[in-house]
Image (cartoon, helix red, strand yellow):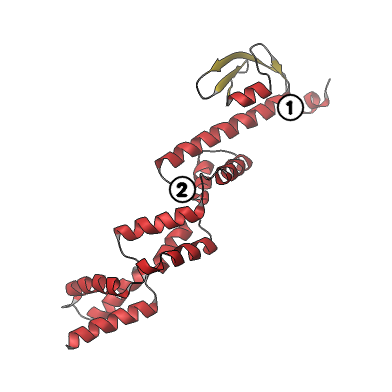
Amino acid sequence: MHPLFICTGARMVTITKIKMSDDQVTVELDNGESLYMPYQISNLYKLDSGRSIDPTEYRQLKEESQRFQCKRRALDYLAIRIRSAAEMERYLQKKGYAHDTIQDVVRGLIDAGYLDDYDFAARFIDSRLNKKLVGKHLLASELQKRGISRTIIKAAIKESESRHTDIDTIFETARKKYAALKLKKNALTKLAYFLQRRGFDAEIVHTVIERIRSRERE
């Protein structure tokens, strides 16, 4: 007897049925399990109803099935909206896939162009700024939470710099906020905190506050 059978207690399993559909092959086994895989894998292993599978091949087919299902789950997740590589990894982990399977699938999606962290960061910044004017610090913080590397964040923020550092636009946002704070105690201090929370750096905050203070003296 092959030593693998002795040390693991594993047994041969037999294919009871092969089901073909438009995009996958379903392999039903006599242990009650169903494996799912693309046609090319089924053809590679020469799978057919009634064929017995030894433990090594069975393990390989299970891995192929897991990888196939993991990739399909990933593509369905991407169909909803663009994702970062880290977001994809976290999602697949929650779905219970093995670490090595996830890494293989994510690498494949990156190589195929389905996952692109720089493109994700650029689109995220564009969408974020279309909704509300914020500064680079807040943009960086939000991208870090989505698993984007510092190098990519820095490059993406640099590319969009003209949109979130335009003093005139920031001033208009600050002026509207100040109108609501004007009658409150320490209004300019509160306005400075507001701008800091929006992610603008100290130099921009100082410039805007001084411009508003100058307007108040006119």
Residue 139 lies, in percent from the top left, at 41, 63
Q: For numbered disc 2, what is the local secondary structure?
A: loop
At x 59%, y 19%, the residue is: 27
Task: Kindly report which numbered mark, 2 or 1, lies closer to the viewer in this rendering.
Answer: 2
* Picture layout, residue 29 above or below residue 96: above
Report the number of numbered marks.
Answer: 2
Q: Which residue is mark 2?
A: 83
Crowding at dot 1, Cα within 10 Å, few <14 / some 14-19 / many 20+, comes out as: few
Q: Quadrant of the N terminus?
A: top right
* The quarter of the displayed image where residue 105 is located: top right
Q: Amino acid at mark 1?
A: Thr
**Location of residue 9 in the rendering, given as x and y in whole percent from the top left corner:** 75, 24
Residue 152: mark in rendering: none
Q: First in sequence: mark 2 or mark 1?
A: 1
Residue 56 badge: 1
Does residue 170 appear in this view? yes
Q: Is residue 151 above or below residue 209?
A: above
User: At 68% from the left edge and 29% from the top edge, which residue is drawn?
Assistant: 60
- Classify residue 59 by image quadrant: top right
Residue 103 at what x, y percent from top left? 60, 44
